[in-house]
Amino acid sequence: MNEETDRGKNDGLPTGFERGTDGPKVIVTGVDGSDTSWRAAAYAAGLARRQNALLAVVYVQPVLAGGAALGAPVVEATEEVAEELLAEIRATTERLRGIFAVRWEFHTFRGDPYAGLVRASDELKADAVVVGASERAGHRIIGSVAVRLVKAGRWPVTVVP
């Protein structure tokens, strides 16, 4: 085989396989306590485990329009939801210890779920985003968080039913 033919075969690209250098480093998943968000988190955890990536679990505490009138009770309620989600994640992690190990972090943001997930994904330098499909019928018309994330086109987005 001559040198010219050999160069044409691999186009100057390295021929060796680099183990562990490809794939996502950070996978963001949004949770809100819904069944689809838990399925998305489970799917994202499996991806993170297989890719040895960090799983960033994000809960966006909604800011309700009437929240200003209600004041502190709304903030306390959303903080309680965040604490319950974190407790559930910790319990699941503990139950699966030794069988299913994944590096994970829990983050909370306040605001609109779409804007919160975008902010989280940007700040955490997400390589992929995994969210659950919306269970609300109205989202077919105005667009769900998942659809808006896909349309943003900034990260690969997986929508779990």
Image (cartoon, rainbow, N blue to C red):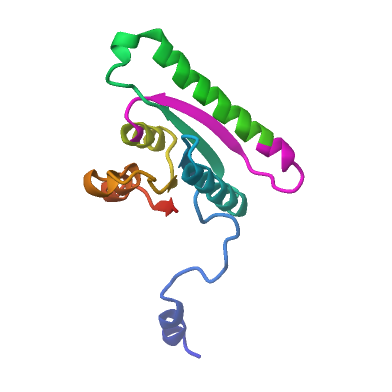
Q: Residue furthest right?
A: 98
For residue 120, which quarter of the picture?
top left
Q: Is residue 33 left or right of residue 93?
A: left
On the image, the x and y values in percent for residue 129 come to: 43, 46
Number of callouts in the render?
Answer: 0
Quick check: is 104 in the magenta stretch? yes
Quick check: is 10 in the magenta stretch? no
Q: Residue furthest left?
A: 141
Q: Residue at x 47, y 46 (%)?
A: 36
For residue 110, which quarter of the picture?
top left
Residues shaded magenta: 92-113
- Measured along the vertical axis of the image, is residue 63 above or below residue 36? above
On the image, the x and y values in percent for residue 42 come to: 57, 47
Q: Is residue 61 left or right of residue 21?
A: left
On the image, the x and y values in percent for residue 86 come to: 58, 28
Q: Residue furthest bottom?
A: 1
On the image, the x and y values in percent for residue 108 come to: 46, 26
Camera-nearest residue between 130 and 2: 130
Camera-nearest residue between 42 and 20: 42
Q: Is residue 51 left or right of residue 11?
A: right
Q: Residue at x 55, y 52 (%)?
A: 47
- Measured along the vertical axis of the image, is residue 132 above or below residue 58? below
- Measured along the vertical axis of the image, is residue 6 above or below residue 59? below
